[in-house]
Amino acid sequence: MAHLGADVAAFVDGQLSDSAMQEASTHLVTCDECEKAVRQQRLLKSRMSTVRAPEPPAALLASLAEMASTPPPRERWWVRLTRAVPFRAGVVIAGASVAVVATAYAIGGVDRVGDEVAPPYNRYAADFTGGSTVQTGNVITEATMAELDSSGWPCHETLAGDLHRVSGSYTESGEVVALTYTDGRARLNLFEQNGALDRAGLEGFTRTTLGGSDVWVRDGQPLVVTWDGDGTVYTIVTDAERERVALAVEDLPRMTSDAGPVDRVGDGLTRMSTWLGAA
């Protein structure tokens, strides 16, 4: 059969007919291009499924309820003004703006999204020490990495200024994006998976601030750094100096616990625009 093309999303969602699903499944066995497209779609679907609908702040709901339950005692000139079309249009726009800001504030405060996951730190470190760049898996092409990067899975070409991306693959049954960076001397493996960090499994790690983000660090050779942000768990395994690791962390989404109102609204608006773009 021909490539799945526009039917990739329908196949992942199980919306094709039984015969078409069977034909597509057979095709995926021999077509790397379609298999990678399906894997990418599943990653995106998994990521979007963890986004929880934000609830409006209680104070906003209370103020709206109070406004609705306290009508003016009698009609005055300004009441007649509120019936004017331009005024009503302005109220609608202002109300929509308040709703957007309130939603952005709520979303910006949601730092931990998705099921808790515990990356296999010891295996990552053992593979690194053994000279393996990433676990054996399906290689991710440059074009696919660019698409993943634009969809919220950071696959930057460089980290920390001069650590260049040399490979990428899917590991852990396709649930983890594994990337390798190097400058010819130091090497850095980056693992990204959907979910929130399982903090109960961080024995031997110390919480600290690195690159402007709250992270957990396990010292040694190699150095292991892990954190979560915006529904993704990031794990770095590297032999690079700590200062360079901080620069690499700074290039990736951060986890902070002390964001102010302005930062929360800005972060929420950024997330909303990213989700709309991915949709």
Image (spheres, grey):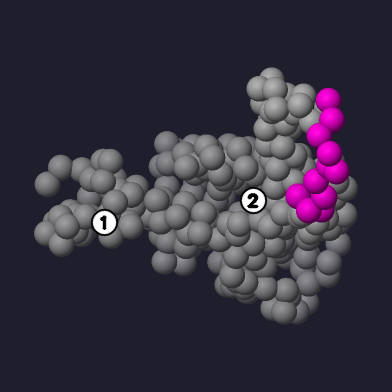
Q: Is residue 246 visible?
A: no
Q: Amino acid at mark 2?
A: Arg
Helix, strand or loop under label 1: loop
Viewed as shown, does residue 254 lie left or right of 135? Answer: right
| Type of amino acid at the residue the image marks with label 1 | Gln
Q: Residues within 10 Å of mark 1 (few under 14, many from 20)?
A: few
- Looking at the rendered structure, the secondary structure element under dot 2 is strand
Return the residue found at the far top: 86
Label annotation for residue 187: 2
Q: Quadrant of residue 111?
A: bottom right
Residue 20 sits inside the magenta stretch: no
Q: Nearer the viewer, mark 1 or mark 2?
A: 1
Residue at 12% over, 47% down: 1
Going by the picture, which residue comes out furthest to the front?
74
Q: Is residue 67 magenta?
A: yes
Within 10 Å of disc 2 (Cα), the crowding (few <14, some 14-19, many 20+) is many
Q: CA distance from mark 1 to mark 2?
A: 43 Å
Nearer to us in this view, 159 or 238:
159
User: Which numbered dot is residue 15?
Assistant: 1
Seen at 32% across and 56% down, the residue is 12
The residue segment tinted magenta is 66-77
- Residue 52, given in percent of the width and then of the height, sits at 60, 59
On residue 85, which mark appears?
Answer: none
